[in-house]
């Protein structure tokens, strides 16, 4: 390849675009490729982020769709609880726009962005790229590579990296209804819509929303979505898509010169399926690590792993316990636990502290409320209950 880059970033989603920008800012000659013809067409996403994450993404105004002040929680037996704060707790993003803004910012720092290029091989000698239009295959020899190529990462597979230990299967469609609440998300629990996880309605305009769900039972996605739509009752739906969400942090990349970022590295919150929050830490650290590697740092991948685990990875690992707890609750358990949202103390704590980035510390505090702890311990198998007690004590 003419003009061999210092760094090849595979994947033009948020993880790749931020990593590329940060590395280029620090002097790395960076090429970012994406197999899509238009990499600003985002992977499937609800586009909901906390206000803090919105700011860490650089408040991309053109991607702003709306502010969220709270949530309506629907139990399996169709009881609803509304928790609403006076100030915004989350922002809904136009995900295509977000990709566009982040890629543009990378280009402004000198990153060469090339679309329609598929990474098809990566070994000790270099990489093979395929131009999807001309079908031409050509080699490249970057000093470092970053796999920011999503949950089914080709880079991870080609270097023999471990897959994330778990995954959720997700489905989502756009919907129109006059009954949506513009400033509230809706969350549905229950084995008929999302066994082991939850379903959501995320408003994107006064009468529009993204309606979706995630579950471990991937073979019944369309059935669950139909059940959910029966409850939500939209007038119209379109743009139905499926995707996966990695759960759990796998071991690091086995290659010193290849880093994995974003969904490719399991950098997702196991409690919410949110990946944008972790990326705001990890992608910057990855870009910095590559720049340090180019300036002589030995094994920048080990440095990257240590730094991102310290910044956010350990918290993601802790949230696995909460993910497991949610997965073990029956519809009856969920009905009786969610009934506690009627208790003013529980509701106040959730309204005051309810942002999706810090669910682990919020859960720890909630579990200090005796009624919450008792209900949960009653519902859980002894071993999981014991682990939960240990966590609260820790
Ligand atoms: C249904 C659903 C709802 C979600 N809702 C939210 C939410 O509300 N909030 C939130 O924070 N997170 C949410 N997430 C998670 C979030 O979407 C992801 O964590 C995020 O998109 C990960 O970004 P990424 O850059 O790592 O990967 P991606 O955005 O998936 O980008 C990967 C890119 O790599 C490219 N690529 C793949 N293979 C190759 C190859 N061989 N060669 C070249 N290019 C390649 C792809 O074309 C793609 O553009 C949701 C996920 C799902 C499935």
Image: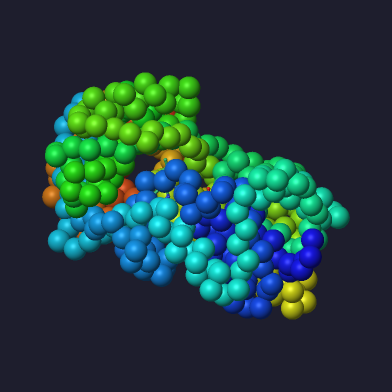
User: Relative to the observer, which residue lies in front, 93 or 287?
Assistant: 93
- Residue 290 at what x, y percent from top left? 68, 69
Q: Position of residue 322 (x, y in %)?
A: 42, 43
Model colouring:
rainbow
Relative vertical location of residue 270 with respect to residue 140 in this rendering, above or below:
above
8 relative position to 240: left or right: right
Residue nearest the observer in this picture, 349 or 312: 312
Looking at the picture, does residue 298 appear above or below residue 72?
below
Q: Quadrant of residue 356 in the image?
A: bottom left
Residue nearest the observer in this picture, 256 or 318: 256
In this view, which residue lies farthest toward the right?
125
**243 on left or right of 229:** right
Q: Which quarter shows the C terminus?
A: bottom left
Q: Residue 74 versus residue 343: which sits nearer the camera?
A: 74
Residue at 44% of width from left, 64% of height from top? 101
Residue 341 appears in the rendering: no
Q: Residue 61 at x, y = what percent?
A: 33, 66
Q: Quadrant of the N terminus?
A: bottom right
Q: Which percent across, then down, holds residue 147?
A: 65, 54
| Residue 181, above or below 325 | below
How many badges with numbers are in the image?
A: 0
Looking at the image, the residue that sits furthest to the front is 134
Task: Inspect this view and state whether residue 61 appears.
Answer: yes
Residue ID at (31%, 48%): 367
Q: Residue at x 37, y 51 (%)?
A: 47
């Amino acid at each position: 390849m003419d003009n061999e880059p210092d760094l090849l970033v595979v994947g033009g989603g948020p993880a790749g675009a931020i990593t590329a920008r940060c590395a280029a800012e620090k002097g790395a000659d960076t090429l970012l490729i994406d197999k899509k013809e238009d990499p600003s067409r985002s992977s499937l996403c609800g586009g909901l982020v906390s206000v803090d994450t919105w700011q860490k993404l650089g408040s991309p105004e053109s991607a702003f769709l709306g502010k969220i002040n709270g949530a309506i929680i629907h139990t399996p037996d169709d009881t609803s609880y509304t928790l609403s704060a006076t100030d915004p707790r989350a922002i809904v993003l136009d995900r295509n726009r977000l990709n566009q803004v982040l890629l543009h910012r990378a280009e402004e720092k000198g990153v060469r962005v090339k679309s329609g290029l598929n990474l098809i091989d990566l070994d000790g000698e270099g990489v093979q790229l395929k131009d999807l239009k001309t079908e031409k295959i050509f080699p490249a020899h970057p000093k470092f590579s970053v796999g920011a190529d999503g949950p089914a990462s080709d880079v991870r597979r080609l270097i023999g990296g471990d897959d994330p230990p778990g995954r959720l299967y997700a489905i989502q469609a756009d919907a129109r209804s006059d009954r949506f609440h513009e400033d509230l998300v809706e969350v549905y629990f229950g084995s008929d819509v999302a066994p082991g996880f939850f379903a959501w309605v995320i408003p994107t305009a006064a009468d529009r929303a993204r309606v979706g769900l995630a579950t471990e039972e991937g073979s019944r996605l369309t059935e669950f979505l139909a059940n959910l739509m029966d409850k939500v009752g939209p007038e119209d739906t379109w743009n139905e898509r499926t995707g996966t969400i990695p759960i759990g942090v796998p071991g690091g990349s086995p290659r010193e010169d290849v880093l994995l970022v974003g969904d490719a590295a399991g950098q997702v919150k196991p409690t919410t399926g949110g990946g944008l929050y972790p990326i705001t830490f990890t992608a910057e650290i990855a870009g910095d690590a590559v720049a340090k590697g180019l300036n002589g740092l030995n094994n920048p991948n080990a440095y990257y792993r240590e730094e991102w685990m310290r910044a956010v990875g350990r918290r993601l690992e802790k949230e696995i316990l909460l993910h497991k707890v949610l997965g073990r609750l029956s519809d009856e358990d969920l009905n009786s636990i969610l009934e506690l949202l009627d208790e003013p103390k529980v509701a106040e704590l959730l309204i005051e502290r309810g942002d999706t980035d810090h669910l682990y510390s919020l859960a720890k505090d909630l579990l200090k409320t005796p009624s919450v702890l008792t209900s949960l311990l009653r519902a859980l198998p002894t071993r999981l209950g014991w682990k939960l007690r240990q966590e609260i004590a820790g």
